[in-house]
Amino acid sequence: MIRCFGRSYLLVALLALVQPAVPAATAVGELAPDFALPAATGGNVRLSEHRGEVVLLAFWSSHCSVCTAQLSLLGDLQTTYRSAGLVTLAVSVDDDMHRATRYAQAHPTRFPMLLDLRKGVSRAYGIERLPTTVLIDRRGRVRFLQSDDHGIDNSYVAQVRELLDDPL
Amino acid sequence: MRTAIRTWQRLAPVALALCLVTQWVRAAEPPAKPAAAPAAVAAPATAGAPEATPEAGAFAAAPAGDATGEGGTRALDEQIQDLKQQVVDLNKDLFVLEEELLFPANTQVAVFVSMDVGSFFGLDSVTLRVDNREVINYLYTPREVAALVKGGVQRLYVGNLKAGSHELVALFSGKGPNDRDYRRGASIKFEKGVGAKYLELKISDKARRQQPEFEIKDWE
């Protein structure tokens, strides 16, 4: 009995050692993981090419009812602060590329709608619910991470302004 | 090993900051006392001279203090520059060390991408397979394509392979003539010897056929 228990304990310990390490999700203050994703309208976008600008990553899905309103508000925010150095990138976590593309075409925005079909980017940023927004400063560090459905309130705009005011 | 090197790279700026702070504290503390001490010793030696009041001492010390401050600042600047240079050198050494340890010359395989003209092909992505195993799938942004068209050469992949025969397959996708989706593959069988192996994926225009051409060159 004891021997059997010992063996199973050893097996569990070995399995724990063999188990591949899951990369930890990015926390606030860490460097934002770089990525390149195809846009729904064609072409590719790489995050590191926007170093020196404030980047707002908005994770969305065509299944998320709140996301439409949020994307629309983000469009207004992008229009207001684009000249100050704000770049908005919307990342779709849809499994179906065609559905995401159709959604993007039906809801045209002023920023690229990117397709994360392999879910590598959403895993790297630890996205657990939608909509989620990640604010990255000019040095490429994650400064704010919001998972809520309140849309854009004043505190949200204040965060964007704080990062825009922060010199490189 | 990579983690250790990255930790070093992260620690280097912290070490620099600590050194700077230490230097600054050292530079800020001592000048006042040594400047005052000789004045006090020298005063009794001058017979018949009026007594040096504290105010006069202060006025007399002021220009000397400025000169020391300027000199000290200059010295501190030089030290900061030296430290910065040391950090840059250290970073360079660590990078070389990382490359040498992770990809030793006897197993290293590097694949480069170059593009000539690019009128018949708009590059979107390249997928590399080595011995039927996907090693990289790289998406190109318009900026990167522009850099390649201007003559840039990109190191797409670097990895390790044991000596022997291997096969490399490259799948190119993008927009072909008349803006149509275009997907083409190229493959090469190569022998990996003792030294490092360098391969080049070359995309060029074939004007006669009005088509792009993809070839893989083995740099001997």
Image (cartoon, coloured by chain):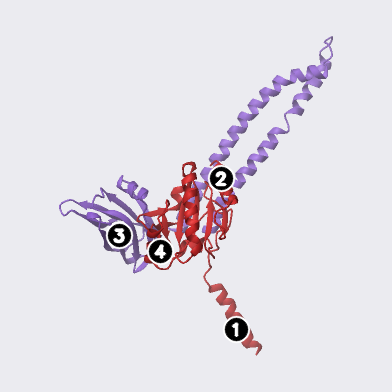
Q: CA distance from mark 3 to mark 2?
A: 40 Å
For label 1, the SS is helix
User: Viewed as shown, does residue A64 lie left or right of B132?
Assistant: right
- Pinpoint the chain carrying mark 4: A
Q: CA distance from mark 3 to mark 1?
A: 50 Å
State the residue at coordinates (53%, 55%).
A134
User: Viewed as shown, does residue B88 lie left or right of B49?
Assistant: left
Q: Amino acid at mark 2?
A: Arg
The answer to whether tags 3 and 1 share a subunit is no
Q: Picture coordinates of residue A121 (x, y %)? A: 47, 61
A84 or A23: nearer the viewer: A84
Q: Residue furthest left?
A: B208
For label 4, the SS is helix
Identify the residue position indicated by label 1 in the image. Answer: A8
For label 2, the SS is helix
Q: Picture coordinates of residue A97 (x, y %)? A: 38, 65
Identify the residue position indicated by label 2 in the image. Answer: A161
Q: Amino acid at mark 1?
A: Ser
Q: Against B52, is A1 above or below?
A: below
Chain the render paints red: A
The residue mark sitting in front, 3 or 2, is 2
Identify the residue position indicated by label 3 in the image. Answer: B173
- Contact, mark 2 vs mark 1 (Cβ under 8 Å): no
User: Viewed as shown, does residue B104 lie left or right of A18?
Assistant: left
User: Viewed as shown, does residue B161 lie left or right of A136?
Assistant: left
Identify the residue position indicated by label 4 in the image. Answer: A100
Visible residue check, residue A158: yes
